[in-house]
C-alpha cells in the first residue's frame, strides 16, 4: 500500500523534528544519515508544493488578455 502524501504543514513539522533531533547530536551516525535523507526528501517535496502554489497564484492573477498581472500579496 502506498504511503499517504503529507501536507505541506505535516512535512514542515516533521522537518522541524528532524532538525531538532540532529541539532541535539545524540543520534548515531546511521540514524543521522537516515534523518538527513528523510529531511532532504521532505525539503524537496515542500519546495515543489510551494512552486506549485506560486504557479497557481500566477495563473489566477492573469489579466483579461491572458498576460500575468502582478499583484502584491497582502499579509
Image (cartoon, grey):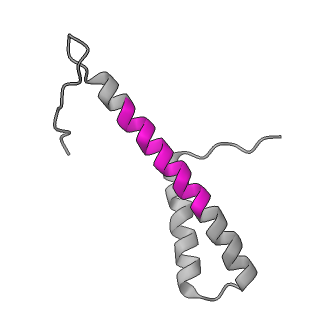
Above or below, comparing residue 29 to residue 58 in the picture: below
The residue sitting at 16% across, 38% down in the picture is: 72
Q: Nearer the viewer, residue 46 or 11?
A: 46
Q: Quadrant of the N terminus?
A: top right
Residue 10 seen by the camera: no
Q: Nearer the viewer, residue 47 or 12?
A: 47
User: Is residue 65 shown left or right of residue 45?
Assistant: left
Image-quadrant location for residue 70: top left
Q: Nearer the viewer, residue 15 or 63?
A: 63
Q: Position of residue 74 (x, y in %)?
A: 18, 41
User: Is residue 3 shown left or right of residue 49?
Assistant: right
> Which region of the structure is painted magenta?
40-55
User: Is residue 38 shown left or right of residue 65?
Assistant: right
The residue sitting at 49% across, 44% down in the picture is: 48
Secondary structure of the magenta portion, mostly? helix
Above or below, comparing residue 70 to residue 60 in the picture: below
The residue sitting at 55% across, 49% down in the picture is: 45
Q: Is residue 61 magenta?
A: no
Q: Which residue reaches farthest top?
A: 65
Residue 75 seen by the camera: yes
| Total tally of numbered discs in the picture | 0
Q: Position of residue 47 (x, y in %)?
A: 47, 50
Q: Position of residue 24 (x, y in %)?
A: 56, 86
Above or below, comparing residue 73 to residue 21 in the picture: above
Amino acid at each position: 500500500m502506498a504511503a499517504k502524501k503529507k501536507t505541506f504543514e505535516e512535512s514542515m513539522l516533521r522537518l522541524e523534528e528532524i532538525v531538532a533531533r540532529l541539532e541535539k547530536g545524540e543520534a548515531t551516525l546511521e540514524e543521522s544519515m537516515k534523518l538527513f535523507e528523510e529531511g532532504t526528501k521532505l525539503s524537496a517535496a515542500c519546495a515543489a508544493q510551494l512552486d506549485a502554489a506560486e504557479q497557481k497564484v500566477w495563473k489566477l492573477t492573469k489579466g483579461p488578455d491572458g498576460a500575468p498581472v502582478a499583484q502584491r500579496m497582502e499579509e
